[in-house]
Image: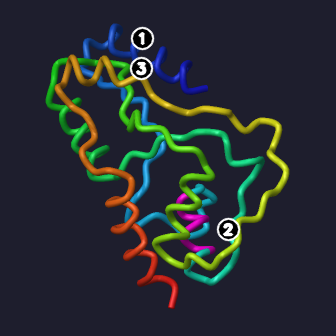
Amino acid sequence: GKRIAETLCFDYQRSHNLDISIARIFNTYGPNMAKEDGRVISNFIVQALQGKDLTIYGKGSQTRSFCYVDDLVLGLVKLMNSKFSGPINIGSDQEFTILELAELVRSKINPNLNLILKDLPEDDPKQRKPDLKLIKQELNWEPKINLSNGLDKTINYFKTLIK
């Protein structure tokens, strides 16, 4: 579906001589996430703040990369202000296992929580990491906020929701 949408945008651009920019956004997190959105970062933070054990699907060896929302917005602004139409990946290329993420969240909120392993869904990808060569080359952009600092800001936001 996403690739077809990109193709339709480029066809529309050619037909109507419009400027377009296509960004492929990878895992983004930060304040103002919905606590029930089902994403791994919000799930872990909410579970930890509620004093619940953290649920990991599979053994936690699958990897993800996480981009803090401020970095994503700066990447989108750079793309919109450029002549580059894309598609271009915007995200972080720093990979973490789900187990590493769970341990980091647990260490920041409540080190006494247990990690509970559940069956991995069949369609869960083993790896999600964008290739950022093009955005670095074309837009001189890369994420600046590391996972630990971004988690601190995100945890502080969720603390205002969960009392």
Which region is colored magenta? 41-47
Left or right: residue 157 compared with residue 96: left
Viewer-side residue, 17 vs 3? 3
Q: Which residue is mark 2?
A: 54
User: How far is the residue under mark 3 from the one under mark 2?
Assistant: 41 Å
Instruction: For marks 3 and 2, give the one nearer the viewer.
Output: 2
Extreme residue in the bottom direction: 163
Q: Please name the residue shown 15% across and 24% down the image.
A: 82
Residue 141 counted in the magenta span: no
- Say which element carries label 1: helix
- Say which element carries label 2: strand
Residue 45 counted in the magenta span: yes
Viewer-side residue, 130 vs 15? 130
Label annotation for residue 9:
3
**Precedes in sequence: disc 3 or disc 2:** 3
**Precedes in sequence: disc 2 or disc 1:** 1
- Say which element carries label 3: helix
Residue 131 place in picture, x, y as percent: 41, 23
Q: Please name the residue shown 31% across and 44% down the image.
A: 72
Q: Badge 1: few (under 14), some or many (20 or more) residues near its Cα, within 10 Å?
A: few
Q: Amino acid at mark 2?
A: Leu
Q: Which residue is mark 1?
A: 11
* Disc 3 + disc 1, Cβ < 8 Å: yes
Image quarter of residue 53: bottom right
Task: Give the vertical position of 126 relative to 102 (above or below).
Answer: above
- Tell me which secondary structure the magenta stretch mostly adopts: helix
* Disc 3 + disc 2, Cβ < 8 Å: no
Q: Amino acid at mark 3?
A: Cys
